[in-house]
Image: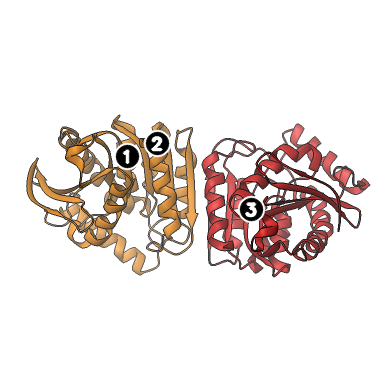
Chain colours: A red, B orange
Amino acid sequence: MQFTSGQRLDDGVLEREFTLGGIPGTLWTPGSASASEPVPLILIGHPGGLLRMYPRLVARARHSVAEGFAAATIELPGSGVRPGSTAAEQARADLRRAMGAGEPIGDEIIDRLVLPLVDKAVPEWRAALDAILSLPEIGGPVGYSGGVISIGIRLAVVEPRIAAAGLFAGSFVPRAMVEEARQVSIPLHVLLQWDDEGNDRQRVLDLFDAFGSKEKSLHANMGGHAGVPQSAGEDAARFFARHLK
Amino acid sequence: MQFTSGQRLDDGVLEREFTLGGIPGTLWTPGSASASEPVPLILIGHPGGLLRMYPRLVARARHSVAEGFAAATIELPGSGVRPGSTAAEQARADLRRAMGAGEPIGDEIIDRLVLPLVDKAVPEWRAALDAILSLPEIGGPVGYSGGVISIGIRLAVVEPRIAAAGLFAGSFVPRAMVEEARQVSIPLHVLLQWDDEGNDRQRVLDLFDAFGSKEKSLHANMGGHAGVPQSAGEDAARFFARHLK
């Protein structure tokens, strides 16, 4: 992991960009990190495109740091400056066409869109964890927060350092991930926008039912994909505070 | 409304029992009520049986008072010291028999069990509101908290003084109440125990979808009917603080 730039935000948060095997990422740590105990880490999930997503990512990271965590994210395969794949671009084009035509989104498209992304991204997030957790100012445990929900599911299954996950059910979920969810056992806080145009509500309810975790909560709110109410963010923050501290 | 007894609880909360047209009830107010501004009111819903439910009711009331509310409840028709009806007892017996036999609970039983209760209880809660809101130490607005969820739905539709409702979906819901729910427009916080043995999960999801409110949240947790986690109670308290203050 090589830090490529760093700056203090106006609230004292230290924001550092890094690359790891050619993958760009960002790490946010408390301003007074060097003087204090190692802090737990929250991985900030997102749909891809660090630059485009920056305003929302930094807002979430600042909240996490204010709550006493470090926060980190990396770019997804095929997004931002990372090379795309013909197959992924074709799947996205098929999805857009189907949504534009008002057709139901077939499992075949969802599988092509999501499963290769999960297979490729999850080892990258784990490698990022190795690097970030080697820093003296970062301790454990680790939480995963946000989407892509299928990446969060796979991480929860394969990565024992992830102790809790706050998952945003705002993307299409392959049927295979519903099955995989049965293997998840960590505490979960699942956020669903009831009228989200970018997911399938019944699939999310099936997914929530499938999770093997003894402790899991589903918080559904109104307002479409981008309309998550402020109170939902506050509830999620309390979830992480309960489980990572 | 006639107060029949009163005591200070160890945290200073004033607990007063009353009767209103032969219906027993309890009112909890802050210890220092006489010296301060009128406080908003939370109606504490329950499945019937004030004496049997007392430990849970007083715990909820104390939380509400600690958050700056008054709290009140009244006995349901046919519960506790109030005379039962042959029809209600028959419906309860039919429900127990069906549940004991592991049969699906038919809408016909649910209708007989719940609809007459709603029709009778709601005017009583409204009369209690008239009496309680005439006390100088109680102001508005008013929230309804808990079950019976169908009583909460009807109150939210017909009683304009109810400004927000935190509804516990822990009882069977008649199909007619799902339709009635479309008329509800106040902010709602709906609590569902995902594996509750005493309701129908799909009916609750249909109900949540039907509510006409622009602002509504569904919080689903694991743990069966009686296993509501502490964090869910805290989330509900924040909901009332946002909407009644």
Q: Position of residue A222 (x, y in %)?
A: 54, 38
Mark 1, residues whose alpha carbon is within 10 Å: few (<14), some, or many (≥20)?
A: many
Badge number at residue B53: none
Badge 3 amino acid = Leu
Please report contact status of discs 1 and 3: CB closer than 8 Å, yes or no: no
Tag 1 residue: B143
Amino acid type at image mark 1: Gly
Q: Chain of mark 1?
A: B
> Residue A170 at what x, y percent from top left?
66, 45
Name which residue type carries label 2: His
> Which residue occupies the foreground of this view, A2 or A241?
A2
Q: Which SS class for mark 1? A: strand
Q: For mark 3, name the chain.
A: A
- The image shows residue B204, relative to residue A52, as above or below, that is below
Number of numbered discs: 3
Q: Residues within 10 Å of mark 3 (few under 14, many from 20)?
A: many
Q: Nearer the viewer, residue A100 or B131?
A: B131
Residue at figure coordinates x 45%, y 33% from the top left:
B212
- How far is the residue under mark 2 from the one under mark 3? 27 Å
Q: Which mark is residue B243?
A: 2
In which quadrant of the rendered image does the N terminus of chain B lie? top left
Secondary structure of the residue carrying tag 2 is: helix
Q: Is residue B84 left or right of residue B147?
A: left
Residue A242 place in picture, x, y as percent:
53, 60
Asked whether residue B105 is in view, the answer is yes
